[in-house]
Image (cartoon, rainbow, N blue to C red):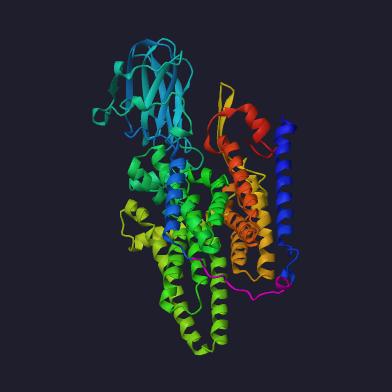
Amino acid sequence: MLDFSFARLLPVALGLILLSFVLFYLWALLPRSGTAEWIHMSERPAFRFVGRYRLGLPDFLIALLLVVLWGAFSLWNLGSLESPQTFHRFEEEYVVIDLGAPTDIGEVRYFSGLNTGHYALYFSQDGSDWTRQGEMNQGFNDVFKWNRAEILDGRNMQFLRLRAETPGLYMGELAIYDVFGYRLNSAHFSLNWSMVARSSDSLFDEQTLIPDHVTFYHQFYFDEIYHARTAYEHVRLMDPYEISHPPLGKLIISMGIHLFGMTPFGWRFMGALSGALMIGIFFLLTKNMFGKRLVALCGTAMFAFNFMLFTQTRIATIDTYAALFILLMFWFMYRYISQDYDVPFYKTLPALFLTGLFFGLGGAAKWSSLFIAPALVLFWIMHQALKGRHYNRTRQRGKFAPYLLKTILVSIAFFVLIPGIIYYLSYLPYTLAANVGIFSRQGFDIIWQNQEFMFGYHADIVATHPFSSTWWQWVLNVRPILYYLNHFPTGTRAVIAAFGNPLIYWGGLLAIFAMPYAFIRRGDGRAFVIFAAYLLLLAPWFFITRLTFAYHYFPNTIFLALALAYVFDHLIRRGRGWYKTVILSFTILALALFVLFFPVLSGRPASFWLFENVLRWFPSWPL
């Protein structure tokens, strides 16, 4: 039961703080007394995309420092660098394990590898008379996890016989415990395989890697059972298990597996690295848009401390890469549309090319990253219209048609041809696993069939999930998704949940609502692109009826933070020095909430009291 004085009082207090901030912002927008500001503020300037601000060497050094600091923080306690690496593939053979002496067997644990099915477990006192005493299941959600066998009676047994009743199962390691919970020393075991040619010592060769207490740190959790598993299969050039999304996201995950092995740290490394890169990129974007390092730093803090960035980039799923490429698409499109209208054509190409490049990479990682496409098209069209107006006003009308034709042609190449090539080539692991050429008819058929499957899967999926949510629940931050939950006998629990920092989610939403006023009253293109990107990225989810989750909102948090950065910049432009104190106080409060909720984001054990009476603000928060 929630304690009203804590869990219910905190959101009320935060709501009052946000209300005070909104009132303060509205007051700051009023004409200052004793000035003629009201005359200037009554004018409505023409709409324009504000020119971008120059990035200097100090900005890139700050961005690099932020990447290093956040990277070190994100990699902390990310996952074990050690995990069973050798696996035995069971076919028709079975193995008899002689424990060396009669033992009261209390538990059998095993680390599962690829494929699904179950093992039969037999016990014997003399090695002749066998009784089936247990079953070891290996379901799709049990792979690369430490699992426990279901044992009926293991008293006074010396021999175990293990047979895979489903051929093709991989097992990495076995651990046998007595009734007191002590692990038996495998050095005293002897193994007798039914088929000498299939014998192996891989079941007991990595006993030092067996954890005393299994947590997310040692194994898959949530959708890692799909994405990290498929990344491993790509490494081994096997047929992929998860085919409901394009391959690139899993290929990026596989880079960490190449570097650090099939370990929790390995399959999560690239996500954490991408999260750190997003911090540096976001700083450069905000400095590019607003020109003030204080605004860039505080805006970056809004993005860093929004909870979702930390949680989502430390789990080996593909949503991190979709968000990363959306951020890069938006940055380079902004650089393109904010160029001076008289810049030579060839100087417009790098930003446009990079936008298209990351558009292609995003589409090859996850289809939902393409939801940003309408915003990119809208910005492109508006830029051409404004540039045409400029050419007309400056009596250069004859130059515009050739420029526009060339721009259309290169845009087709950058946004259609190059993304198409990237997308097609991302399927190389599929064709390598099938041992066919990627440009062969068989390779084309494999790729086309996957497109048909993905479209049908996402169009027809019918499922339920206890932590699913809809788009309006993401916006209001009322339904997190629980990735991991573990209860400990010490009166503590470990939780990993994906949701938002209430200050940033709710404050950012209020800032988003302020953007239309800003671009209508002040003609500020920065406010327009922030609002349009947020809305158009969210809009497709209004019409999607399939199962959705809070992490689908992750890319939108980019624009919540940008909207807050815009408000910070506008306050500073009002000219009163103590406004900076308000901005810094807002940032510190965001950091304080991040620290308060850190146990929910990191999986660090904390007391039941903290979860129930401080952190669980709403009954719909499954913390």
User: Is 256 or 523 nearer to us in this picture?
Assistant: 523
Q: Magenta part of the protein: which range? A: 39-53
Question: Where is 437 relative to 495, above or below?
Answer: below
Question: Where is 561 relative to 3, above or below?
Answer: below
Q: Residue furthest front?
A: 34
Residue 43, position in %: x, y? 71, 74
Residue 241 visible in rendering:
no
Please report the residue visible at 47 percent of the width from the left and 38 percent of the height from the top. Answer: 140
Residue 579, position in %: x, y? 65, 54
Question: Where is 388 relative to 354, above or below?
Answer: below
Whether the magenta-drawn stretch holds residue 46 is answered as yes
User: Is 481 or 462 nearer to us in this picture?
Assistant: 481
Whether the magenta-drawn stretch holds residue 437 is answered as no
Per the picture, the main secondary structure of the magenta-coloured stretch is: loop
Residue 576 visible in rendering:
yes
User: Is 318 or 194 nearer to us in this picture?
Assistant: 318
Q: Quadrant of the N terminus?
A: top right
Give the side of residue 144 with respect to residue 198, left or right.
right
Q: Residue furthest left?
A: 197
Please report the residue visible at 43 percent of the width from the left and 79 percent of the height from the top. Answer: 344
Q: Quadrant of residue 136?
A: top left
User: Is 247 or 342 nearer to us in this picture?
Assistant: 342
Give the side of residue 574 with respect to residue 30, left or right.
left
Residue 547, position in %: x, y? 60, 49
Q: Quadrant of residue 595?
A: top right
Residue 98, position in %: x, y? 32, 16
Give the side of residue 566 with respect to residue 198, left or right.
right
Q: Quadrant of the C terminus?
A: top right
| Number of callouts | 0
